[in-house]
Image (spheres, grey):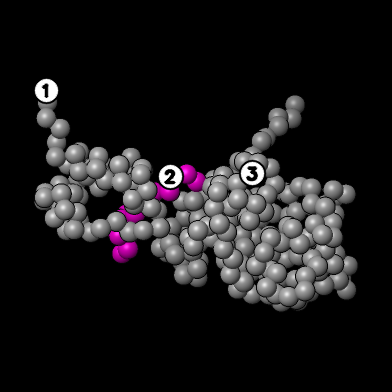
Amino acid sequence: MKKIPIFREVAQKIRERVLDGTYVSSQRLPSEYELAKEFDVSRLTVRKAIDELIAQNILVKQKGRGTYAMQSQKIQSGRSGLQGFSEAAKAYGKESRTVLIQFEETPFEEKLWETLQADSRETIYHIVRLRGFDEEPMTVENLHVRAKYLPFESEKQLTDSIFQLIEKKIEIAYSHQEVEAVLVDAEMSRLLQVPVGNPLLLVHSITYSVTGVPILYDTSYYRADKYTFKNTLHRRI
């Protein structure tokens, strides 16, 4: 029987640790030196094992930061219809975390007021939030919400589900989304803890009531290593 190369044996041990949760995606793996010492092999052997696991999308190397386990299961937006972030967290058995970065009344912008079909005298709130699952940053939300549809008593409530607050006033029915790929800049790198130049998903969406009233305009940045978006497309003939 052909002997398995030592680097493949090391790769298998590391793979098992990823699968059993010993190495999680938010935790940096031990250094090549530490792994070489633990497995009693050379650093070159460890490097070959890591390269193989990177090629298999089990590990990812981030320049200047180290090697991490890939997320075993990406969050699939749209899997269960239109959901808020808090609702999606529950669906995946995770706890959501929200940091309110900014809250203010939006200065008048004709294009935004037209998008939301708001009267020029109407107040629109601007809300920026950093959101995460189980202490891991996932998305930066940049929301514009028509004030008359967002009842709240304190800013603390704005770290809860915005959808649930809105639905105390009006029922949400659907959302139109556009998704594009962008690169992480310095600010997104700081907030989402990913290297500058990594890919992000930029999602523009407008959320409507059951009567077709636009309520919320959302421009959010999602980590591409954590999210996928699911849509159903119908062919028109």
Residue at horizontal 84 percent and vertical 60 percent from the top? 169
Q: Which residues are magenta?
A: 61-74
Is the N terminus in the top left, top right, bottom left or bottom right quadrant? top left
The answer to whether the residues at label 3 and label 2 have Cβ atoms under 8 Å apart is no
Residue 121: give x, y in percent of width and height.
88, 73
Which amino acid, mark 3? Answer: Gly
Q: Quadrant of residue 205?
A: bottom right
Residue at horizontal 70 percent and vertical 47 percent from the top? 82
Image height of 69 relative to 31, above or below: above
Image height of 61 relative to 98, above or below: above
Query: Which residue in the structure is indicated by mark 1?
Result: 1
Q: Earlier in the sequence, mark 1 or mark 2?
A: 1
Query: Which residue in the structure is indicated by mark 3?
Result: 78
The answer to whether the residues at label 3 and label 1 have Cβ atoms under 8 Å apart is no
Query: Which residue in the structure is indicated by mark 2?
Result: 72
Q: Residue furthest top?
A: 1
Q: Nearer the viewer, mark 3 or mark 1?
A: 1
Image height of 148 relative to 52, above or below: below
Q: Secondary structure at mark 1?
A: loop
Q: CA distance from mark 3 to mark 2?
A: 19 Å
Q: CA distance from mark 3 to mark 1?
A: 49 Å
**Local crowd size for mark 3, using a 10 Å CA cut-off: few (<14), some (14–19), many (≥20):** some
Residue at horizontal 40 percent and vertical 53 percent from the top? 25
**Residue 79 is covered by the magenta coloring:** no
Image height of 79 relative to 234, above or below: below
